[in-house]
Image (tube, helix red, strand yellow):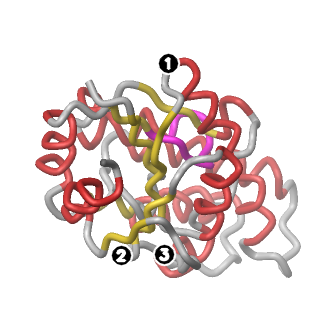
């Protein structure tokens, strides 16, 4: 087994769930606040990487929505339910790439700023539960991503890990955790001076061969 754990962000790194997320939220919003314009895939992309509390504050900021918090809570709950049977778009060669990393001896995990249950829905709909040893999410701990990274490392017995993500917040979380960061440049964000860069998920094994010697 490798001495380095690989920890992945989810949205913009392993999959793009914007289409089914928009579909699920629009079903709730149409029922609860039918006067609102429907959310688009671009709307969802614009808030990827935020905590669910931040997302609720960012979407429709200028609209008067009765019981705003309760409505967005319902959207979040239904989103998880919906994603169990409506998988997001997995990035090309998703399974083959992760299987090859496991075969090399890496232990894989997921750390995301998502709500409770979102990663379980990803694992179920993608059929990838067998690939990951552990995960953590903001909705379960209430902790910042950097602290959740350290939490997963510690409970799996790793002192060294690499975090793979697509946004500046991901990079900051890796720095908080004191570990290298590989930028998934095909995702939703830009960063400065990462330790590594990949332009497709299946480029990760080659980048690790360079970085994790």
Name the residue located 53 percent from the left edge and 42 percent from the top edge: 111
Give the answer, above or below, for where 213 lies relative to 107: below
Question: Which of 82/18 is in front?
Answer: 18
Mark 1 closeness class: few <14, some 14–19, many ≥20 residues within 10 Å? few
Residue 188, percent from left and from top: 48, 75
Question: Which of 17/213 is in front?
Answer: 213
Locate residue 68: give its quadrant: bottom right
Name the residue located 71 percent from the left edge and 50 percent from the top edge: 176
Q: CA distance from mark 1 to mark 2?
A: 31 Å
Locate residue 48: give its quadrant: bottom right
Mark 2 closeness class: few <14, some 14–19, many ≥20 residues within 10 Å? some
Residue with the mark numbered 1: 157
Question: Which of 22/90 is in front?
Answer: 90
Contact between marks 1 and 2 (CB within 8 A): the answer is no
Name the residue located 45 percent from the left edge and 40 percent from the top edge: 110
Q: Which residues are magenta?
A: 110-118
Name the residue located 59 percent from the left edge and 59 percent from the top edge: 170
């Amino acid at each position: 087994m490798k001495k380095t754990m690989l920890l992945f962000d989810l949205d913009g790194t392993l999959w793009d769930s914007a289409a089914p997320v928009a579909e699920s939220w629009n079903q709730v919003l149409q029922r609860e606040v039918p006067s609102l314009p429907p959310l688009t895939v671009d709307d969802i992309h614009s808030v990827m990487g935020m905590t669910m509390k931040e997302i609720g504050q960012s979407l429709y900021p200028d609209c008067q929505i009765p019981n705003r918090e309760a409505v967005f809570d319902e959207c979040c709950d239904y989103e998880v339910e919906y994603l169990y049977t409506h998988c997001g778009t997995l990035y090309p060669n998703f399974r083959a790439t992760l299987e090859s990393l496991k075969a090399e001896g890496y232990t894989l995990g997921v750390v995301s700023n998502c709500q409770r249950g979102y990663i379980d829905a990803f694992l179920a709909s993608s059929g990838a539960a067998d690939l990951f040893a552990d995960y953590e999410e903001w909705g379960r701990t209430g902790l910042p991503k950097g602290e959740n990274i350290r939490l997963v490392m510690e409970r799996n017995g790793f002192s060294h890990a690499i975090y793979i993500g697509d946004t500046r917040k991901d990079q900051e979380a890796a720095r908080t955790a004191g570990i290298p960061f590989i930028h998934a440049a095909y995702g939703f964000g830009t960063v400065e001076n990462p330790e590594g860069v990949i332009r497709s998920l299946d480029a990760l094994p080659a980048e690790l061969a360079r970085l994790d010697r």
